[in-house]
Image (cartoon, coloured by chain):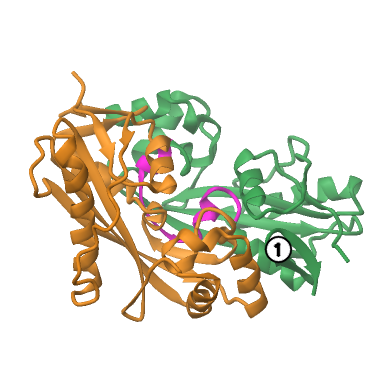
Chain colours: A orange, B green
Amino acid sequence: MTGPPLVLASGSPRRRELMERLGLAFEVAPPPEGLEPPWMGTVPPLEFAADLAGRKASAVSASRPDAVVLGADTIVVLDGTVLGKPSDERDARDMLLRLAGREHLVHTAVAIHGPGGERRPVASGIETTSVRFRSLEADEIAAYVATGEPLDKAGAYGIQGYGAALVESVRGCFFNVMGLPVTRVLALLDGLGWRYEFPGRLAPR
Amino acid sequence: MTGPPLVLASGSPRRRELMERLGLAFEVAPPPEGLEPPWMGTVPPLEFAADLAGRKASAVSASRPDAVVLGADTIVVLDGTVLGKPSDERDARDMLLRLAGREHLVHTAVAIHGPGGERRPVASGIETTSVRFRSLEADEIAAYVATGEPLDKAGAYGIQGYGAALVESVRGCFFNVMGLPVTRVLALLDGLGWRYEFPGRLAPR
């Protein structure tokens, strides 16, 4: 017996890569744009991320009631301020200047919907990882931004590519910084009765 | 002006992959086998790893006096005992059973030789990362070992592949667990007057 289809409600290539590493069979269905509720900035960042992860999973689950749908939202927080995706190169440089030589938090909210197309998650959680950057000189930051890597990423860096040269240490789940807290997701699925089995199968408990 | 050739004295595909992520131009020259000194087990593990990293770099540097040569040795330590590469599947299962649900240490010793072919490192260091495994059931361990991933790796796991499903959290440099503490290596090179510049050049300071 195998489980229901697994759908990743995300367009992130990094999340897809992590699911692939686990050998899991899954489909990718990016949620529609513009799911952010109008009250962004008026609620605490963690609540916002949790809500948005749920909206992503819910939007995809509505058309895939046969599937287990996984939504996620990752935010970078420094001194209580959320650093989103940079609007341009200058914004990216400003963010990296603030992150340099310091520790910040990366939160990924995860929401699992279905099967059944209900509007509420059947399981959810938030994983937090602390990330410390080495100190950076202004010309280094400019050169990193010029690689193009920061422009589509929350906090203006990717920990996997050139960004490996920026990050001195982490505390917590490393994969969370890439956008998906792997063992946390597996634990949530396990709690729903779907156990991950090497080399890549979800089997009923 | 560009720096001298950079040579990685290691056969590890994971170390090579990390260097490639940085965009660095480098050559790979695996050191000869059998460099382990006869007194393995009679000195503290960290001293042993530091010595072996130096022997690897020195062996390669002797034939490449034109180059900066980077040697490394990674060890996994649980309760003061070094877990090397498993001798067979049973040994791998035993190691993973010990690691499950607990925290262990991964140390990578790094030694840089040359240019000049001297027998002593011009820079060296040891980076330590703490890694926590989730709890594992015996049949999960057997299935993970059956993937073949653990067999050529110290501590019987790879954090990059299926092993992502094993590791709950880390404290310290993540890339150290893959075999090369990236920012530490760049800091050592920087101390020698070779600064890493995006997108992948060592330039004189």
Residue displayed at 72% across by 57% down: B111
Task: Please tell me which residue lies in front, B159 or A86.
Answer: A86
Residue displayed at 39% across by 33% down: B94
Quadrant into which the C terminus of chain B falls: bottom right
Q: Is residue A45 magenta?
A: no
Q: Position of residue A196 (x, y in %)?
A: 27, 33
SS at circle 1: strand
Q: Position of residue B173 (x, y in %)?
A: 51, 60
Q: State which chain disc 1 sits on.
A: B
The stretch in magenta equals B162-180
Q: Residues within 10 Å of mark 1 (few under 14, many from 20)?
A: many
Task: Please tell me which residue lies in front, B74 or B14.
Answer: B14
Q: Position of residue A14 (x, y in %)?
A: 43, 48
**A23 on left or right of B70:** left
Q: Which residue is mark 1?
A: B124
Task: Please tell me which residue lies in front, B16 or B72.
Answer: B16
Q: Position of residue B154 (x, y in %)?
A: 53, 40
Residue B137 shows up from this direction: no
Residue displayed at 66% across by 44% down: B16
Q: Is residue A125 above or below residue A194?
A: below
**B153 on left or right of A199:** right
Quadrant into which the N terminus of chain B falls: bottom right
Q: Is residue A67 above or below residue B186?
A: above
**Given the image, on which type of amino acid does mark 1 rest?**
Ser
Residue B174 shows up from this direction: yes
